[in-house]
Amino acid sequence: MSPAPSDAFSTIADIIAETANIDRAKITPEAHVINDLGIDSLDFLDIVFEIDKRFGIKVPVEAWTEQVNSGKAPAEQFFVMGSLAKRIEELVAAKQG
Amino acid sequence: MRLEYFEMVDRVLEHGPERLVARARVPEASPVFEGHFPGFPLLPGVLMIETMAQAAGWLIVARSGFARMALLAKVGEAKLRGMVKPGAELTVTAELRHDGSGYAVLHGSLAEGEARAAEAELTLKTLPFPAAELETAVRARARAIGLA
């Protein structure tokens, strides 16, 4: 069963701590997953796979990256922990209709 | 198989959106066997994994309608169960576990007859073809192995 939206942040933080072997205390809502937590592309891929499975969604990483690279959205909109959790909650809500 | 060219899959036997089965015949002779090993030739384990990864890659390429290339990013839970000798007729199977955004996770397996030879969980990065020459080569190879 998918976690409730309010649990998204802690669920994602747990996934990151476990997958990338990062101190759970460092994973705050303000932390940037790459700049602050130092997650590399392969670990990020593992994290996204775990998020996809745990929440039953398909995190649109390619579309997000494209928006950032084309200047249509700031990286913080997707890759800062608090924002990432919100995006995941939105995806779960959209799936549930 | 042409080991020196990393052409591991000889013929696709069946494929659908989530599964691909192919034949791969280990050559009787190859410079690879001169070193691995003198007097006791065996298909290296890394090439067993490469064979499963290529079958997985072909499944992803076909699923995308030849719009995307797949590159091996991670090998998990690899088990090399049996020794594979020159001349072996192998069946390689790739099954999709998850199709993500820019990546896919598959289970690969390799068998000689009824005997399991190897298996692994394979994570592939997927991306639009980065070079036209590569796309042309992939399409040509796909035709040669009966995938297109």
Image: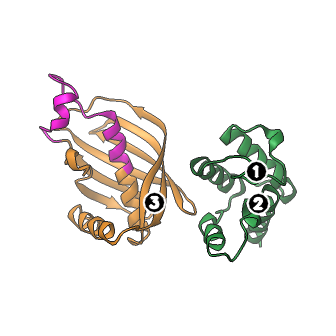
Chain colours: A green, B orange
Q: Is A79 rendered above or below residue B129?
A: above
Number of marks in picture: 3
Quadrant housing residue B142? bottom left
Q: In the rendered view of the protein, which quadrant contains the C terminus of chain A?
A: bottom right
Front position among marks 1 and 2: 2
Residue at position x 23%, y 29% in the image: B36
Q: Check if mark 3 and mark 1 are on a common chain.
A: no
Left or right? Give the position of B109 relative to A52.
Answer: left
Q: Nearer the viewer, residue B21 or A49?
A: A49
Q: Which residue is mark 3?
A: B18
Q: Which residue is mark 1?
A: A12
Mark 2 Cα shell of 10 Å, populated few (<14), some (14-19), many (≥20): many
> Of the residues under marks 1 and 2, which one precedes in the sequence?
1
For the residues bearing labels 1 and 2, Cβ distance under 8 angstroms? yes
Inter-mark Cα distance, 1 to 2 = 9 Å
Inter-mark Cα distance, 3 to 1 = 28 Å
Q: Which residue is mark 2?
A: A84
